Amino acid sequence: MELENTTKSCWASAVSACSEAPAEAAATLCGTHRAQLAPLDRTLLDLDNAMREVQRLREVRKGLNNAWTPVRLTVDGVSIERAALKLALDYAASRALEDWAPPDWLPAAVFGQRELPEGCGVALAVRVGDSIFDSDRIGITLAKSDRTGRYECVVLQLREQWKLLCTWDKPIAALGTLHFGKHRYEAGEDTLLHPRRVSYRNGDEDLALSLDFDWSGHWSPKKYPNVAKLRK
């Protein structure tokens, strides 16, 4: 699966499908539906803010050998997944892709009205030894299989070495070999579907930092105030 290097400087633009008319892939959402999806954009901003805060704390803590108070920044995995699907629809419509027609049911999944098939959804592409470090680059692209010629997932490269994949009708483990520039990942071995926790270390030093994902569907600012306060 070959990934084109598409970079975007911002997160959000209008999703290009409506739950009331799912086949209209190029339709513009009405104000009501845009408002319904606005929290998804905020969820991606929460993820970006949390990653920036982790990076800040890493710089503060590394090399000081203190017994740090654990910091767990928990983001809304379910909404991130829906946001990724929203971006897939937007990406396809904004580029007027003629070789991809989203499934009729996909907008319903974006609006939280339908669950994805088993094995599909958001996964983190990572290998033991991968380092994750700060970068302002944000990449969003649809990935096409070099075996089938079909678009099979959307890829969010949020920061250098952070690669979140999201599939809608093909299980993550069945994607085969993933190509990120010169790097190759085997989807069946090098991906974590619905990751729970990414912990941060400085070599052998535990920095007591983690970025967690809540997959309960009940994330709220009151439940995770340390993430919500980053919005300010």
Image (cartoon, rainbow, N blue to C red):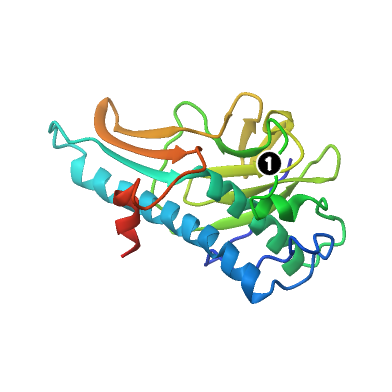
Left or right position of 153 against 22: left
**Quadrant in the rendering for residue 211:** top left
Residue 5 appears in the rendering: no
**Quadrant in the rendering for residue 166:** top right
Left or right position of 72 against 7: left
Residue designated by label 1: 115
Left or right position of 216 against 33: left
Residue 201 appears in the rendering: yes
Q: Residue at x 58, y 28 (%)?
A: 190
Depth check, front residue: 32 or 229: 32
Q: Amino acid at mark 1?
A: Glu
Q: Residue at x 61, y 69 (%)?
A: 34
Q: Is residue 65 above or below residue 115?
A: above
Depth check, front residue: 229 or 36: 36
Where residue 50 sits in the image (x, y, percent)?
Answer: 37, 50
Which residue extends farthest bottom?
31
